[in-house]
Amino acid sequence: MLARRSIPRLIRSEKTRSDLREKLALVLRIRDFAIQALALPDNGSYRCYAEIGRPAAVWTVFAAPELSVAPVTWRYPLLGRLIYRGFFSETAARRFAGELRLQGNDVYVHASPAYSTLGWFDDPALSAFIHRPEFEVAGLIFHELAHQKIFVRGDSFFNEAFAAAVEREGVRRWGRARELAEEAAESILRAEVEIRRLLGLHDKLVALYASNLSRREKLAAKGDANNAHLARIAAYYSYVPYFETLIERAGGDLSAFYSAVNRLARLPGPAARREALIGQSRRSSQPAT
């Protein structure tokens, strides 16, 4: 936060490298698009830039038991229970991961290029992601701003799937606005192929761990699969199709979509929210009679 610098000022400065100036100008265009086309928060986030001197903004540690894809959770003030622990130091993250591994858990450390302060502060664009491909930068900004739009205390599955759905819809619309719709679709599809593979493996392991096989047989059948990695993928993407169906149900009107999501967010507890989300999605896909 202390390293933040105004993007317009950096663009005007003769000291700013030309390649960085182009990326900063792109961030401002993406930021304006997020407000105008996606109805995302209009505030100071992503109107400043910070050089952070490291390849990731934060390293997030995920864990799950060796015979379960249910993620370990940690409780935080204001945020409730989350499925990860975050560290600004990779060394500290891997040290903590090692401790969890010694306790018998599968562990996965993810280098995150950004994170959201949920609107409490003006989040800067970071050197950790600004030089990535255009659609990645756009999707990341849309995702983090979506967390500012709606965040439910203690429900990582709901929050991450909602933000991922907004990210995908935003990238599609950004691609159309840039007359790069085909390239945007290819970017989404490349990620989707791997996500579907991992979700399929996740579901197979759920069935395996619930079976009557012995512990030794389950471990043998599991192979080298990492439950913690699969738990992260499930949290971020399992419910994305249901949110995307709600966007379709709203006729692409994102303000109406956000209102529907806010109604779900007010339901008491993750199970009730997911049941209602799936139920609404299925009802909206039924043919009219």
Image: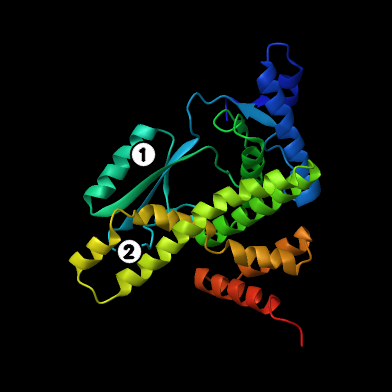
Amino acid identity at mark 1: Ala
Q: Quadrant of the C terminus?
A: bottom right
Q: Quadrant of the N terminus?
A: top right
* Contact flag, marks 1 and 2 (Cβ < 8 Å): no
Tell me if residue 149 can be seen: no
> Element under label 2?
loop
Vertical arrangement, residue 236 with respect to residue 283, above or below: above
Labelled disc at residue 93: 1
Q: Nearer the viewer, residue 222 or 251?
A: 222
Residue at horizontal 68 percent and vertical 27 percent from the top: 23
Indicate the position of residue 234 as horizontal and vertical percent values: 47, 60
Labelled disc at residue 68: 2
In the image, 218: left or right of 60? left
Tell me if residue 27 can be seen: yes
Count neighbours of disc 1 (C-alpha within 10 A) and say few if under 14, some if 14 to 19, many if 20 or more: many
Residue at horizontal 40 percent and vertical 33 percent from the top: 89
Give the residue at the far bottom of this rendering.
289
> Element under label 1?
helix
Vertical arrangement, residue 49 with respect to residue 40, above or below: above
Count neighbours of disc 2 (C-alpha within 10 A) and say few if under 14, some if 14 to 19, many if 20 or more: many
Indicate the position of residue 130 as horizontal and vertical percent values: 61, 31
What count of labels does the image hold? 2
Q: Quadrant of residue 92?
A: top left
In the image, 276: left or right of 69? right
Numbered disc in front, either 1 or 2: 2
Amino acid identity at mark 2: Ser
Indicate the position of residue 20 as horizontal and vertical percent values: 66, 22
Indicate the position of residue 282 as horizontal and vertical percent values: 63, 77
